[in-house]
Amino acid sequence: MFCRSGTSMISLIVPAKQQITQISTQLTDELGTASNIKSRVNRQSVQAAIISAQQRLRLYSRTPPNGLVIYCGTVITEDGKEKLINIDFEPFKPINTKLYLCDSRFHVEPLTELLEDGSKFGFIIIDGKGCLYGLLSGNTRSILHHFPVELPKKHGRGGQSAQRFGRIREEKRHNYVHKVAEKATQLFITDNKINVTGLVLAGAAELKDDLEKSDLFDPRLKSKVIHSVDVAYGGENGFAQAISLSRKHLDNVKVVHEQELISRFFEEIAQDTGKFVSGVEETLRALEDGAVETLIVWEDIKVKRFVLQNSTGVESVRYLSPKQEEDRTNFLDKETGVEMNQVSDGPMVEWLAEIYSNHGATLEFISDGTPETVQFIQGFGGIGGILRWKREDYDIAGSESDGYFQKGDVDDEYAEFF
């Protein structure tokens, strides 16, 4: 964690829908405010950080689809030296948090939340005034579509008039449910595949029940309904209430999904298909080759990725546990025995979250909340993959590792992770 004694480290997070011009105006105002700081050293540091953030912001004519993250400031490294940090990037998935902080450290909590859960849940909020379709991914919610409706109220008069109005009312309700079901298929099924982990139906009791029972509701979506809940509101307020009332069910779905995922991995092993890989080195080799279909990573794995440079300028990458990091021989050039320069380092899990899609893989984070996932973590080092094709050019079990995280060393190397 980078930090310093002053408050000259800028953390700026711009959500996708925020205008760049608004953020630029805010930074200009903050720069003016910074001129009132009494300490000359602190004032100059803060002003320099804000100016750096402004320069980074000017690189963008509009906010990227997933939002924008900027970190700028002078930090004190572990060896007591000052280092200027200027970072800007688009998150790997949409971020809804708006943040501006000038502090003694960079605030990465909103980015950590993005890594917590990749499951997506669809919501259909239906009542007599309209229908809203929402999506929940981790702590990020978004509205996919919304349309209003005007349904005729019950007719209080008797005779034929009441029967005629009753038929009209039922016909409009039927058409409304038909439209809701049709739009749900368009939004939650892509390329003939369901694009959400589960569905929640919420709203007025009769309408949501009619939708779930309707023959017009796609059977594939029916099978994904994990909860049906009455809410007091429609629209966005109903969406928020439905999320709150469905949390327990969403958590249960995540557990089931993890169990099914690990069971599939173990099935590949049991059938000896050769379409699996485990361990850090071998899994990342397969990933780089484009062979990994599903990349499985324990969310709390404490492996760091180090980029090292030898005396001739050639760079190499090593993945080390905290225990291995303490052993300086892991930073030596194998050919010369000289310690290499450290170009960069960071959590492997964050690096994977940035690059996995470049290799055509799906990234699945797992917890240690079930016996199946614990077995995967303890037996396979917390990282592995299901492959697109059988690999024969190297040992799938990872026995050809270059000395870092060999599968046979799991008990020693990973004991500190559990």
Image (cartoon, rainbow, N blue to C red):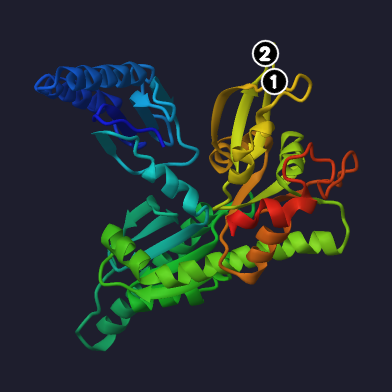
Q: Which mark is residue 259?
A: none
Looking at the rendered structure, the secondary structure element under dot 2 is loop
Which of pointers 2 and 1 indicates the residue nearer the eye?
1
Residue receiving disc 1: 338
Q: Amino acid at mark 2?
A: Ser
Q: Is residue 170 left or right of residue 276?
A: left
Q: Which mark is residue 311?
A: 2
Q: Is residue 225 left or right of residue 258?
A: left
Residue placed at 15% from the left, 23% from the top?
34
Residue 277 visible in the snapshot: no
Q: Nearer the viewer, residue 83 or 78?
A: 78
Badge 2: few (under 14), some or many (20 or more) residues near its Cα, within 10 Å?
Answer: few
Residue depicted at 22% across the width and 24% down the height: 27
Total numbered circles: 2
> Is residue 412 something that shows in the picture?
yes
What is the x, y in percent for residue 366?
Answer: 59, 57
Nearer-the-camera pick, 11 or 81: 81
Q: Is residue 74 above or below residue 115?
A: above
Q: Which of the pair 52/19 is nearer the observer?
A: 52
Q: As displayed, is residue 287 above or below residue 179?
A: above
Establish if 115 lies above or below 105.
Answer: below
Which quadrant of the rendered structure holds the N terminus?
Answer: top left
Q: Position of residue 124 (x, y in %)?
A: 41, 63
Q: Quadrant of residue 170?
A: bottom left
Where is residue 11 drawn, in percent x and y? 32, 32
In the image as oriented, which residue stretches furthest toward the right? 392
Residue 110 placement (x, y as % from top left)? 37, 44
> Is there CB contact under 8 Å for labels 2 and 1?
yes
* Quarter holding residue 223: bottom right
Q: Residues within 10 Å of mark 1 (few under 14, many from 20)?
A: few
Alpha-carbon distance for marks 2 and 1?
Answer: 8 Å
Q: Who is closer to the viewer here, 270 or 337?
A: 337
